[in-house]
Amino acid sequence: MCGIAGVFGTDLAPQLVYLQIYSLQHRGQESVGISSWDGKDLRTVKKGGRVLEAISREDLESLKGFSAIAHVRYSTSGDSGHVNAQPLERETPLGPTAVVHNGNIVNFLPLREELSKKGINFHYSSDTELFLALLEEEKVFLPEGLNLHPKDKEILPKIFYVLNRLKGAFSFLMIVGDKLIAGRDPLGFRPLCMGRKRDAILFASESCAFDIVEAQFWREVRPGEVIVVDESGIRSYFPFQSERHAKCIFELVYFARPDSYIFGDWVYTVRKKFGIELAKEDDVQADVVIPVPDSGVVPALGYAQERGIPFEMGLIRNHYVGRSFIEPTQELRNLRVLMKLSPNRSVLKGKKIVVIDDSLVRGTTSKRIVNMLRRAGAKEIHMRIASPPVVGPCYYGIDTPTREELIANRMTLEEIAEFIGVDSLKYLSLEGLRRAVKESGNFCDACFSNNYPIPVDTGALKRNRP
Ligand code: SF4
């Protein structure tokens, strides 16, 4: 769970990338970093915390150049402290190199062990360092029949070698000397989009990061694609192809911003369809539909419109608090729920309500919300979840709890309803979830289906978690 952004071709690159990463703040709030390249020096600023508070005017003024990459981080691999904040940079055989990465490399530990034995040093505990460490092997990989532009012949086979060794989810951006390189793993787990602003080329995890700098969304980087941008132009290569893709459906359920375009569709449109499908599978009688803000709002609109039940804001969110789901400890999560939401009694008192949330993971947040709604006078509470029960952890870059912590693995539907204190509980079916997306066969829905697209050594991953 991270956000990445990159800009090439304007002296405002560091400033634009700073704004872009601000609009991706929802993808990670632990740390932020920016690297810039001016043709001579690679400069990097990395701090713990959120973009606006962490990066000072002086920091931004110290970054210069026509090329920049940036990152907001929530750790899924390695230490959660900001020591692992990205971009990671080092002097590699290709010259000064910096990298940002969104995803999770599932063969991180065996690869690190292998490289360490060869005397290649690791300075961080994050899987992202593999992008730099593997370059030190100075090995090449070039698929048969793939013709490279003369400007790419020196560097790209070495980058392809690195990518060919990595297994898992990776959308990445690299500054390699005068080039900006972007790419997505062959299954395309994490999103990565491309935009234009006059002569500059921009990249970002989500298209909302182009709106904030008045750039135009151009297209998505395709799964398995590697794009090189330099002063000679833009070149696209497909060194790795996969018959099918595994785009993360949880991005559409929860993570991505509703105003973004990713995975070939608007997040808003798909999220609303989750609510419509949920409504089609439900017949409970109620006076009002209320969302758990913010991520329950869009599916609740779809549900309310489909069922013809009034939509009301029964919970009001304090916008000065971060998202509870992505805080690292349970204690902080609990506190944040109470700080974040308050009941709107004018809507709730004496009413039969349908409450829509995007997902139900541990159940502790829902329990607190239901308690709050009861105290505010709701007569009946019917909880509806716009995704199926979460039954498996994610190994591809989203920080979900362990299998044992997931409430759907510990309790029956009736037991969960009793635990959170609702009159009834219903989830969107897996079929309904799949109906809402285009080409559902090209999505990963493993946390709902246990159908993992890449086999994982879970023992090795556990040892790597903070
Ligand atoms: S397991 Fe779930 S969260 Fe992870 S990539 Fe697949 S759909 Fe996304």
Image (spheres, helix red, strand yellow):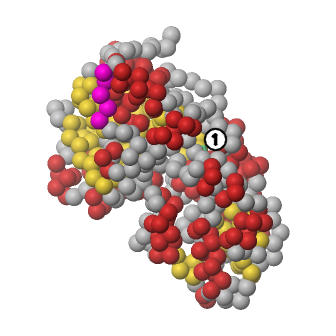
Residue 226 locus on image (x, y percent):
45, 28
Task: Give the answer, above or below, for where 229 lies relative to 291.
Answer: above
From the viewer's perspective, tell me whether residue 406 is left or right of residue 84: right
Residue placed under numbered mark 1 in the picture: 444
* Residue 362 shows up from this direction: yes
Residue 386 locus on image (x, y percent):
68, 60
* Residue 306 shows up from this direction: no
From the viewer's perspective, tell me whether residue 231 is left or right of residue 209: left
Task: Give the answer, above or below, for where 431 lies relative to 358.
Answer: above
Q: Quadrant of residue 254?
A: bottom right
- On whether residue 122 falls in the magenta region, the answer is yes
User: Cβ of disc 1 within 8 Å of ligand 1?
Assistant: yes
From the viewer's perspective, tell me whether residue 207 is left or right of residue 371: left
- Which contiguous range is marked in magenta? 119-123
Give whichever of 403, 340 is nearer the camera.
403
Task: Give the answer, above or below, for where 386 lies relative to 285.
Answer: above
Q: Quadrant of residue 423?
A: bottom right
From the viewer's perspective, tell me whether residue 293 is left or right of residue 8: right
Give whichever of 375, 60 is nearer the camera.
375
Would you call the spot at circle 1 few (<14 residues within 10 Å), some (14-19), or many (20 or more)? many
Residue 272 locus on image (x, y percent):
65, 60
Ligand 1 position by quadrant? top right
**Image mark count:** 1
Residue sitting at x 62%, y 86%: 375
Residue sitting at x 48%, y 40%: 463
- Inspect the image, locate mark 1, and give the three-letter code of the amino acid beneath it: Cys
Residue extending furthest toward the right:
283
Secondary element under disc 1, as helix, strand or loop, is strand
Give whichever of 405, 205 is nearer the camera.
405
Residue sitting at x 46%, y 44%: 465
Q: Main secondary structure of the magenta part?
A: loop
Residue 212 locus on image (x, y percent):
38, 56
